[in-house]
Structures are given as structure tokens and as C-alpha cells.
Amino acid sequence: MKFIFFANTTWYLYNFRLATALRLLADGHEVVMLSPSGKFGKRLVEHGCRWIPLNMDRASLNPLREVATLSRLVGVFRRERPDIVHGFTLKCAIYGSIAARIARVPGVISAVSGMGYVFTSDALKARMLRPLVKGLLRLTLNGERSLLILQNHDDAMAFSKAGLISPEKIRVILGSGVNTFRFHPSNRTTHRHERLRVLLAARLLEEKGVREFIEAAAILRQQERNIEFLLAGSPDPGNPHSISRAELRRWTEAGLVNCLGHVHDMPALLGSVHVLALPSYYREGVPKSLIEGAATGLALITTNRPGCREVVTQHGVDGLWVEPRNAEDLAACIAQLDDDREWLSELGDRAREQALKKFDERFVIQQTLDVYAELLRPDGSPVEEARLVP
């Protein structure tokens, strides 16, 4: 069988969907990765995937340009003749569904990780786009041979209540999974007088709580605490809420944070820190950095928001919740962990248990393959133990 994975960046395909593609290749299937050009395209090819660059602007609203993009997409699908198109992120899910219907692709999977800018922002642009996007979702998600994969039950309820899709067509899979062998607890012991290292790893968007993270660093420095703050990730110029490079320079020059940029070896970085913080008020799917931090056995600090609470399920048990947009609360939680290293270790141990139980990528990948198998069944009916075989 042939699968096309369609996303808006090569970075997304490489970081979030490569493991699933490799499983399909190992089972004897063909996988084509489709996205706009990007530096991770070469890496996809090195891993044995075929990659097709698509001329597409993910932020464009120009009708002529978008029609041209759809036309190119239909052309790719007609040439490749896949059995299933799996579109990731909102725009690719919509465009992939439309193009697949025109090209008569047998099966379409749409995957939306979080509600995203259009549904969560109060900006004028987002509010103007919202009715259009809702209409397109109703049109595209309810196809006869299509299913929607969401990453948490809050999103499933939101899509259903808004009338965007029939509940029977929704499948919930908790994130894209984590390799629990590659991400594992380090053997080092955290001593009481060792400098606490706190990491935020994410796309550098306001809604990820980046500014609150920096404010917490300033608060704790005023308290003369010896805590190191690290920021891993790059600005996202395609998103109107991206942190600017000028801000990053100012924070670095002020000594508030060590900005690492994009980090290739995340297991090594996570193995060198004590706390993974993501004080997000973004409508997340299931944040990759949180499940990687959990697998590494780090103490997690996040918010009681959709997606985040799938990982930290109880405050003080498998991590800590902070109030969204509250730098003082974040600083207080970090200070607590700085003072109580035994609790720090206990939270990390429980986070690791959660990762093994719920987020191991082998389990998540099999769930995805089961959805493929369900979609390709002649009657399209759900099955308890579907298996996709070569």
C-alpha cells in the first residue's frame, strides 16, 4: 500500500511522523512525505522516505495562490495514486481532504493537533477566518471514506459540539508518541547544592508561556536563587504571535536565559536538566516536549489546559500545574522544586511511569495503524484489534 503524509513543514514530518513512516516502511508499505521545501527534507530521504516538495505558503490568504496550491496537490495525488492521504495541521487537513476527494483517493485521514491560532486567538484576522475555516471543515471532514484523529478529548468534544464533524468519525490518539528507549532518565544524581536547570522547549510563541518563563527567571534572580533557565526552539515567522529574535537577544544579554535555538539532540539536552516547564495557554494537542520530558524522568511544570493535562494529570502527583499567564505562580513552583530535591525526583519518577503507560510511540503508532486498517475495511466499520499488514 502507498501512504502520503502531508504537512506544512519538513520539520513537522521529521520530528512528529518519521517513526510512523519507518514502521510502515518496515512492514513493506510505501511512504511519500509531502510538504513545502525545508532543511529536513534531506533527512527524511536519508531515512528511506520519498519526499516531494510542494510549492505552498502556509500563511497565504491569496485566493489565486491557494487555488494554484490545490491544483498542484491534486496533480500529486493523481500521479502517486495513494491508498491513504494523511494530512497534518489544519490547513493541510482541509486542503488534503479536498484534493483527495477530487483525485478519488480511497482513504483520507485528517489529523489536527490542537485548535490553533484561528480558533484560539481574539485577533481580528483570526475572528474573520473562523467562519470560513469552520465551513471548510464541515465540508471536508465528513467524507464517506475519511476519519479525523485528534490528540485529546477536549478537542474531540469541541469539534463535535461545534457541528464540524460527526462524533462517529473522530478517533482520539494521545499525541505522536515518544521513544522511551531514546528518551530515558539519566543516571546522574541531583545533589541539593547542584544548580537547578529549567528548560522550556517549544515553538517560540507567546501562547506557549515564553514571556512568563522569562519573567519567572527575573523574579527568581531578584531572590538571588542560583537557577539556570534554558530556552530551546526557534521563532516562527509564519505565526503572528511569534517571539522576535530581538527579544531573544535582549533576554540573553540581560542574563535571564540561555537561548539554544533549534536543538537536534533533545535526549542529551533533556538528560542535562532537572525541570521541563511549558506554561502554555495555547490550545495544545499533546505537547511533544512534555512527553519527552516525562520519558526522561523530569519534573514537569505546565498548565491545566487541554493537551497539557493529558500529560500532567494531577497537580503535585505527576507534575505541577501553574495558572496560565502567571509568572509569579511559575516562579513559586520552580522555587519549591529548588528547595525540595527529593520531591523533584519523585515527580520525575511518576512522569516516567506516565510516559511508559500512555505515550510510548510503539503503542501510539499501532493505534494509528489500526485507524488506517479501519478506514480501508470494505464496510468501514470500527474493529477492536485491527492490524495493517503488508
Image (cartoon, rainbow, N blue to C red):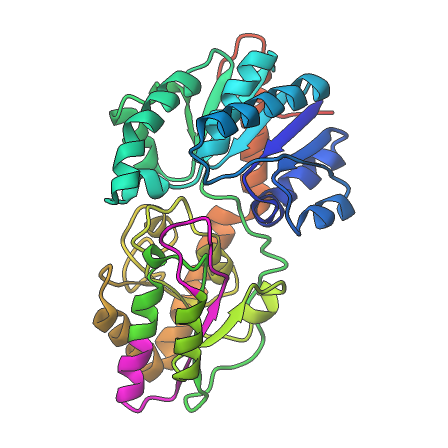
Q: Is residue 199 visible?
A: no
Residue 194 lies left or right of residue 37; in this view the side is left
* Residue 343 placement, left or right of 34: left
Residue 244 position, x and y percent, is: 41, 63
* Image quadrant containing the N terminus: top right
Q: Residue at x 61, y 40 (%)?
A: 36
Q: Is residue 133 above or below residue 155?
A: above
- Asked whether residue 182 is in view, the answer is yes
Residue 227 lies in the magenta stretch: yes
Quadrant in the picture for the C terminus: top right
The foreground one among 45 and 187 is: 45
- Where residue 338 sits, quadrant-wise, is bottom left
Q: Position of residue 237 (x, y in %)?
A: 46, 53
**Where is 13 relative to 85, above or below?**
below
Residue 57 pos. (x, y %):
52, 38
Residue 230 x/y as whole percent: 46, 74
Instruction: From the viewer's perspective, tell me whether residue 337 is left or right of residue 55.
Output: left
Front residue of 245/139: it is 245
Q: The magenta stretch spans which residues?
A: 216-244
* Left or right of residue 18: residue 155: left
Res 174 → quadrant: top left
Please name the residue shown 58% across and 8% down the image: 378
